[in-house]
Image: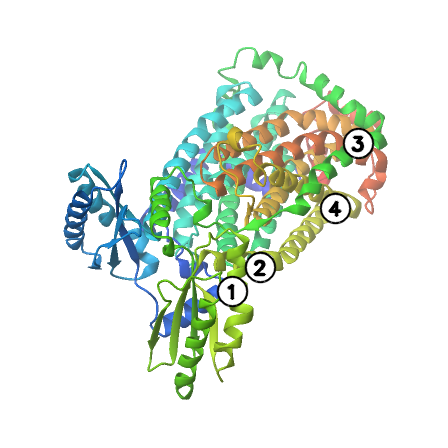
Amino acid sequence: MGNRNVLTRTARWSARHPWWALVIWILFAGIAMAVGGQTGTKIATNTDLSIGQSAQATAIAKSGGLTQPPTEALLVTSLHGDLDKQAAEKAATDAVARLKGVADVASTGDPVPSANGQAVLVPVVMKGDQDTAPDRVQPLIDAVKTAQDGNPSVRVELVGPDTVKAALNTLLNDQVGQATLLSFPVTLLVMMFVCGAIIAAGVPVVLGLSAVLAGLGLWGAASQLVPDPGAVSELIVLMGMAVGVDYSLFYLKRFREERARGLGKIDAVEVAATTSGHSVVVSGTVVVLSMGALYLGGNLAFTAMATGSILVVLIAMSASLTVLPAMLILFGRALERPRVPLIWRLQGRSNGRVWSVLLRPALKHPAISLLLSTVALVALAVPALHLQLKATGVDDLPKSMPAMQAEARLTQFFPIQSNTQLVVAQVPPAGAAQLRTAVDTLVQRAGQDPLYTSDPAPEIATSHEGQYVSVAIGTRLTSGSAEARESLSRLRNDLVPATVGQVPGVKWAVGGSDVAYDVDYRAQVVDKMPWVLGFALALTFIVTALSFRSLVLALVTVLLNVLSAGASFGVLELVFQHTWADKILDFQSTGKVVAWLPLTLFVILLGLSMDYHVFVVSRIREAAVNGLSVREAVEQGITRSAGVVTGAALVMISVFALFASLTFIEMKQLGVGMACAVLLDATLIRIVVLPSVIALLGRFVWWPSKLVAKPKAEAGSEAKDEPVGLAARTATAGEAV
């Protein structure tokens, strides 16, 4: 075969040396996992994740040595009825004695009874840095649990931010691990229905699994530079299984088709490499570039998610283009065995007719079909105009977690522990006295404002002979409330500027609370969103235009993606900002959507939808080049690719749905959002909107390139003599992409 490109040469080498290709891949995956096991995954600290004025407040406090040591609370309450004070005192004494024997405990305070006498609190100060406290709190939890076992008549528990974060990490690891394990048999089951044979179904799943494992390993090393904010490993599993299976499935499908037409194994691999392999490169490039748009998000969470996703997508692409041809050669005819009863017989008999029936309205009445489908998608997208974003805080964590139930009891008996705004300031040496006077004035004015609490009085700390000052102004407001946001706004925009802000040379900031982080995070997301979306769409336009040499098709692709994403955002608003789906999906609505989700969902959907978009459009163009009319080409291209596209979409939806079953609201929203997005994109967009648009535009859809169709006689002769027409068909397919 002449004119072989890099993809074809790579596939041919792999097919000629299958054992070498397989061994090299196994070594690569093994080394990647070993590297990840050696380095571990570095988790992002609160300081790493700080944004805006919250980050400035943290920086000033650290530079002045005003950061507070990590502090938890030993809480003793009644199991039933009134608290037995003697039993509570005994339990507290027992727990304190055990805590003093823990290496990471710096000190314990005196017992403090609640106002109603129904609880006892003992402050527990930990050693070391606040950022690492969640990783070191488990021995304290174990000590308190031992005290609880020895004092069964009362409830003894450790409460605090580090306990909650440690419990959340444990819950996430357990649930994500279960979802990940379930994703493999579920994916295999879906692939059995798509492929009709167990071996053929297993090959994409094995390659997807290897991509995930290698991606997790390399992410461990990458996280030493870009720490994991907490969702990257889950995203790697989602993306790795989705694209790893999809890319392999596209390649496998074409290989099986060419073998069924009578080509030898090597020739079938070359055709698959030139056609489906090229589609994999194009779609994979779009995924990488669209995920790369998250680097413009301007915070660690987006940077980490982009890095992890790009790693696993590049690995999945490499697997499909290198080791997959070797596996196809090694399995050979065994790919068709053992056959799945009934599914095998149904394959190829009714599928074409079914898809032709589904496509008939769009091809016979494209204008009406386009109008109705667009109206439906726009109607779904309208609620997205009312999306309310919120950074995840304590209020959003699963209430079923024991740590969250303990947190609720702490807030009930000691409400002063709720949301404290931290004001920090730095001045030159000459302004120290004036700064202290300004801080006193600030405390006085805040005490007269009903948004803040003055009982007990706000804590003021100073360092460096008064050059650095911090003051903790308490509230009794939940972080998600409008009043809490108002308390922060009033400090930042009124009280602090009018007092501390008047000191010459002062640097000040207000942070230190969930509400401050939420406000700063949302502000940055909203500010960066146009840049990220615009960059991702521009890259999609450029890659599509270059790949198909068509500006019209590139514009259509961008518009379809915007329509699909908008509808998906609307579904998120309908499901998660209202309460009707709470019992169905087993969650409690917060009335908000996780702040990072829309941007992340958009770029992931943009990339994943290009998987089958490139595959489908390539098949349509290939049919048009072979002499079919535009509508005939649309019907043939979609019906021939429908099985694999449906299978790819089902794999994605199944995996995403598993993550939608998790209790953590971030994972649930991501799973539901992605599953709905793929469902809409693979059905309404690909079956109705896309064929309607191409049918209406006709050959203008390929403008400015001129699509030269082969004479029907030539195309027909190639169909009759498949082996003889190999070079011509491969060249045609290569031009199609």
Look at the picture and state if 252 lies above or below 498.
above
Of mark 3 and mark 2, the one earlier in the sequence is 3
Of mark 2 and mark 1, the one earlier in the sequence is 1
Q: Which mark is residue 554?
A: 4
Of the two numbered discs 3 and 2 in the rendering, the one whose residue sits closer to the viewer: 2
Circle 4 SS class: helix
Asked whether, in this view, residue 180 is left or right of residue 279, the answer is left
Asked whether, in this view, residue 564 is left or right of residue 145, the answer is right
Quadrant of the image containing the N terminus: top right
Of mark 3 and mark 4, the one earlier in the sequence is 3
Measure how far apart labels 3 and 4 are at the Cα level. 23 Å
Q: Position of residue 126 (x, y in %)?
A: 25, 58
Q: Which residue is mark 1?
A: 52
Q: Which mark is residue 523?
A: 2
Circle 4 packing at 10 Å, graded few (<14), some (14-19), many (20+), is many
Give 405 or 372, whichever is nearer the viewer. Answer: 405
Q: Which residue is mark 3?
A: 372
Look at the picture and state if 680 lies above or below 519.
above
Identify residue type, mark 2: Ala
Circle 3 packing at 10 Å, graded few (<14), some (14-19), many (20+), is some
Asked whether, in this view, residue 600 is left or right of residue 452, the answer is right
Q: Are marks 2 and 1 in contact (CB under 8 Å)?
A: yes
Circle 3 SS class: helix
Q: Are marks 3 and 2 in contact (CB under 8 Å)?
A: no
